[in-house]
Image (cartoon, rainbow, N blue to C red):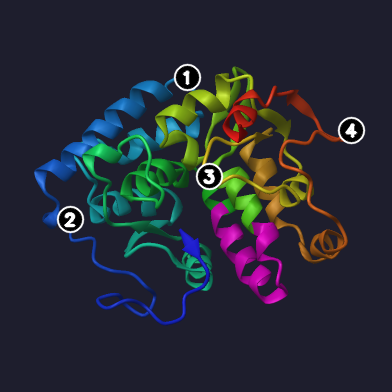
Amino acid sequence: MSADGFASGPPPGARADWTIDQAWEGYSPAEHQVWITLYERQSSLLEGRACDPFLKGLEALDLHRSGIPDFGRINAELNRLTGWSVVAVPGLVPDDVFFDHLANRRFPAGQFIRKPDEVDYLREPDIFHDVFGHVPMLTDPVFADYMAAYGRGGQRALRLGRLANLARLYWYTVEFGLLQTPQGARIYGAGIVSSHAESIFALDDPSPNRLGFNLERVMRTPYRIDDFQQVYFVVPSLQVLLDATLQDFAPIYDRLARASDIPIAAIRPTDLVLTRGTQAYALSRAQ
């Protein structure tokens, strides 16, 4: 979770790297019940929708157990599998802090959980979005390497002033990415797997475009932060995603500096079109 516009250092109680103690023992029974409710609803929906690496990660980390996971417990297995760990933060953190954590295989996660009346939507990511949504994929070695490479790339993008383009890559992969499999498209993005409604919309609804992944195309495409996506990008494999991120982005940034954004619902002649969406949902919301 990153955000810019921070005028000062860490808030009171946070360390210099913006981490805090999870204080797992302080969660109430009601808060644990919210996790259990969300987990049971999503895990039952995602079989046949989420990709195998995500489902295997859920099983490996045993995120259900007795409620909100204790980071100390899940970090032992996560670190064994891919060298990653989860660290608690008080909310959104500055971009440079976020990228430093990712580059060093630490995933910053919110410590709070939503209220019972917010189970369907929460604007600011909470522990369910961050841990249930993101962390299972970090058990996959290829995706784990991608996230660390993204962190290193973010540090460079900050220096080069191209963060807006790189943020789109994160949005359309880590948050709202789809993976092509022999059984069809499957979800790996955290923003989808942690959302009951978008887990259905992303795969089944005729409204959005679903396009083959192309790095520069993604980095030229704006995104929606307040509603279902109008376009999803489908990667042919996680290895393709990693390989795209390991290349030198400097010449890409040079080309992007001379290129205009592509309208969010546009389809270009060079796109690999997997689903040509009706955009009916977005049009209905604009009325």
Label 3 with label 1: CB-CB less than 8 Å: no
The residue wearing badge 3 is 175
Q: Earlier in the sequence, mark 2 or mark 4?
A: 2
Residues under numbered marks 2 and 4 in contact, where contact means CB atoms less than 8 Å apart: no
Separation of marks 3 and 4 at Cα, in angstroms: 26 Å
Vertical side of 181 occupied by 160: above or below: below
How many marks can you see? 4
Dot 4 crowding, Cα within 10 Å, few <14, some 14–19, many 20+? few
In which quadrant will I find the C terminus? top right
Which label sits on residue 269?
A: 4
Residue wearing tag 1: 48
- Tell me how far mark 1 sits from mark 2, CA to CA: 32 Å
Residue 80's label in the rendered image is none
The answer to the question of whether label 4 and label 1 lie on touching residues, with beta carbons closer than 8 A, is: no
Q: In terms of sequence position, does the residue under pointer 3 or pointer 2 come before the other?
A: 2
> What's under tag 1, amino acid-wise?
Gly
In this image, 6 relative to 179: left or right?
Answer: left
Q: Residue at x 34, y 37 (%)?
A: 60
Mark 3 vs mark 2: give the one in front.
Answer: 3
Residue mark closest to the camera, 3 vs 1: 3
Is 46 on the left-hand or right-hand side of 154? left
Residue 166: quarter of image: bottom right
Q: Secondary structure at mark 4?
A: loop
Asked if the residue under mark 2 is in contact with the one under mark 3, i.e. CB atoms within 8 Å, the reply is no
Alpha carbons under labels 4 and 1: distance apart = 32 Å
Read off the magenta span: 147-166
